[in-house]
Image (cartoon, rainbow, N blue to C red):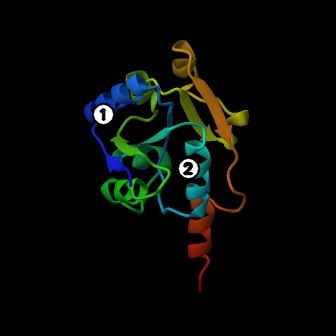
Amino acid sequence: MGTILTLEAAQLARAELRASGARLVFTNGHFDLLHVGHLDYLEKARACGDALYLGLNGDASTRRLKGAGRPLVPADERARLLAALLPVTAVIIFEDDTADGLIRALQPDVYVKGGDYANKTLPERPTVEVYGGQVVLIDYLPGHSTTELIARVKALP
């Protein structure tokens, strides 16, 4: 089971991983309404290295980026659920609009994002490339997204 860390604690744990030669994978997102698509993505991300740190957009960040009414689940609850998942080593809640600051601070060996970024600009890519990290895009499990789940719930009679 993973843990919820402050950035400072994550940096200390990262230093230990580096010293032991372990490969750190990092991903980030909102993970609102946790579903099997998230689990599939996190399992694939973890397979890229020895430890998986997850940057979780906090409530204010999620409201700015996803709009009114989001998140549906508060950040502290989302973090607790995510940390309980086997693939996740640690969760770090952050309030920025991108994970650039976390990536600069942690310098993961691998930065993972969803395959939907294949045709979009990934704002964190330049930061990862500056220190020699690798960017990996992972396809989502078709038919499993939070947006689709919300639409199905809204369509219920």
In what element is the residue under mark 2? helix
Q: Is there any visible trace of residue 59 in the rendered image?
A: no
Q: Which mark is residue 7?
A: 1
Residues under labels 1 and 2: Cα distance? 20 Å
Q: Looking at the picture, does residue 122 appear above or below residue 127?
A: below
Examine the image and state in which quarter residue 53 appears: top left
Q: Looking at the picture, does residue 12 appear above or below residue 127?
A: below
Give the residue drawn at x 45%, y 23%.
Answer: 107
Which corner quadrant holds the C terminus? bottom right
**Residue 77 point in image, percent of width and height:** 34, 60
Q: Is there any visible trace of residue 46 in the rendered image?
A: yes
Amino acid found under the numbered disc labelled 1:
Leu
Q: Which residue is mark 2?
A: 42
Residues packed near mark 1 inside 10 Å, few (<14), some (14 to 19) or many (20 plus):
some
Give the residue drawn at x 46%, y 25%.
Answer: 21
- Of 120 and 45, nearer the camera is 45
In what element is the residue under mark 1? helix
**Residue 104 point in image, percent of width and height:** 42, 22
